[in-house]
Amino acid sequence: MKTLHFDCFAGISGDMTLGALVDLGVDAEYLKTELAKLNLDGWKLDFVKERRGGVTGLHAIVDLGGDTSHVADDEEHHHHHGEGHSHHHHAHDGHDTQDEHGVAHDHTPHVHRRWKDIRILITRSDIADGAKTRALDIFTRIAEAEAKVHDTPVEDVTFHEVGALDSIIDIVGAAICLDFLKPDRITCGEVELGAGVVRCAHGMLPVPAPATQLLIQGMPVTTGGFDKEMTTPTGAAILAASVNEFITTARFREARTGYGIGTRNMERPNFLRVSLREEASEAAPWKTETLTLVEAAIDDMTGEAFGFLMESLFEAGALDVTLSPCVMKKSRPGTIVSILANAERLDLVRRTLFHRSSTIGFREIDARRLYLERREETRIGEFGAARIKTSFWDGEPLRAKMEADDRARIAREKNCNLDQA
């Protein structure tokens, strides 16, 4: 099994991803030819050999040639992967600043790109279907995160973070590279977020940035390894849309390794490492992991309160939450709240249970979960983008299902029953 593995010990951004994947073996001229199919002018992509911490890799540089007509309000925010940029929106003062690649740009005028405009741009292009689907998936995740952060409908999102021309090149370029490599699966270890604050259009915000905070949900992450922002919204979205499994240990044969160099020279090596691995098929067609089962029996909360509690637990990172009726002492009808959580989210789940429910104590049990490999992709059809989840048995597709929210949206638009969508 050919596996592509991301080692994000120094975080991840769009340009670091491009540099690493080309260093791994993606043909740079093929990448540029495919990107040209976007029919966007005013950019040039170069790859320069540089060294960080004694390791040589490729630094991807998007040169806009001083043309600011394509620059959106994300040039400072979206990348800056802790590499030489202060990560975040234009200052709107007309002064030159450096983008994530260290390239100076004048910030007037600014072009804001709406999500639906970017979607049309990618959909109408002639890039390969696999790359097109992945690029739309990455952008969809960022759009949904931005919509939640700013409390606005997804279709109305105007990209302050990733609307600039160089950002589009990063995201679509990463999708093209991954489609070129066509790994059987993609894995990733812990993701370093960095520390400190980032300067955004709305002021100084703590690392990780709000959109990044949403995009990394469910990922194993670390903080404090660097005093700058190391994982950007674009980098987090690439992982969220591409990684099949986050792992801490593995047995494999290393085939090739590539390094994407970050702009900043820092005390610790600032690069993204990716590798192609040959892994033996697992003996069983399913995967296993150890989680914690948290259970609380409650007899003094209303139905509305239980609904709010369930929503809060999922927001805290619970993998599953169920409510079961029971009979408690003094023959009182009650409810057992059962929560599955991994170690990274357990403390937040505990705090949420104490603060959002009436319980004063609960049980915890180690639970061994067996599950099939699952992959999610966004497909484009007559009624727009829809997310499809596919489960696999021993590497072969077993069943596929559309995300319930997308089915409901299509059913409303078609004015039909849910099972007809």
Image (spheres, grey):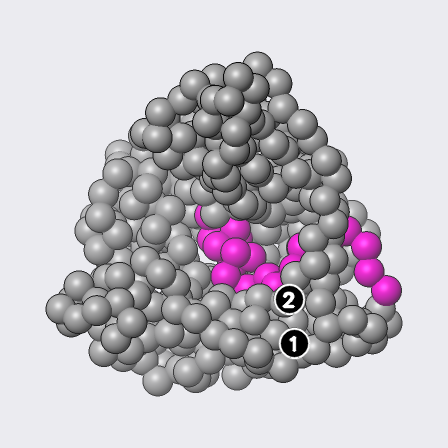
Mark carried by residue 258? none
For the residue labelled by badge 2, is the local secondary structure a helix, a strand or a loop? loop
Judged left or right of residue 192, residue 376 is left
Judged left or right of residue 384, residue 393 is right
Relative to residue 211, is residue 271 depicted above or below? below
Name which residue type carries label 2.
Leu
Spot occupied by residue 325 in the image (x, y as percentages of width and height): 48, 36
Residue 325 drawn in magenta: no
Q: Residue at x 13, y 68 (%)?
A: 415
Q: Nearer the viewer, residue 329 or 130?
A: 329
Spot occupied by residue 49 in the image (x, y as percentages of width and height): 67, 63
Residue 353 visible in the shown view: no
- Count of numbered labels shown in the rendering: 2
Q: Residue at x 41, y 74 (%)?
A: 133
Number of other residues with Cα within 10 Å of mark 1, as a class: few under 14, some 14 to 19, many 20 or more: some
Q: Residue at x 42, y 42 (%)?
A: 211
Q: CA distance from mark 2 to mark 1?
A: 7 Å
Judged left or right of residue 191, residue 241 is left
Residue 232 drawn in magenta: yes
Q: Are marks 2 and 1 in contact (CB under 8 Å)?
A: yes
For the residue labelled by badge 1, is the local secondary structure a helix, a strand or a loop? strand
Number of other residues with Cα within 10 Å of mark 2, as a class: few under 14, some 14 to 19, many 20 or more: some
Q: Which residue is mark 2?
A: 372
Residue 368 visible in the shown view: yes
Q: Which residue is mark 1?
A: 393
Spot occupied by residue 97 in the image (x, y as percentages of width and height): 40, 41
Relative to residue 136, is residue 353 depicted above or below? above
Spot occupied by residue 109 in the image (x, y as percentages of width and height): 21, 48
Segment tinted magenta in the rendering: 231-251
Q: Nearer the viewer, residue 245 or 87?
A: 245
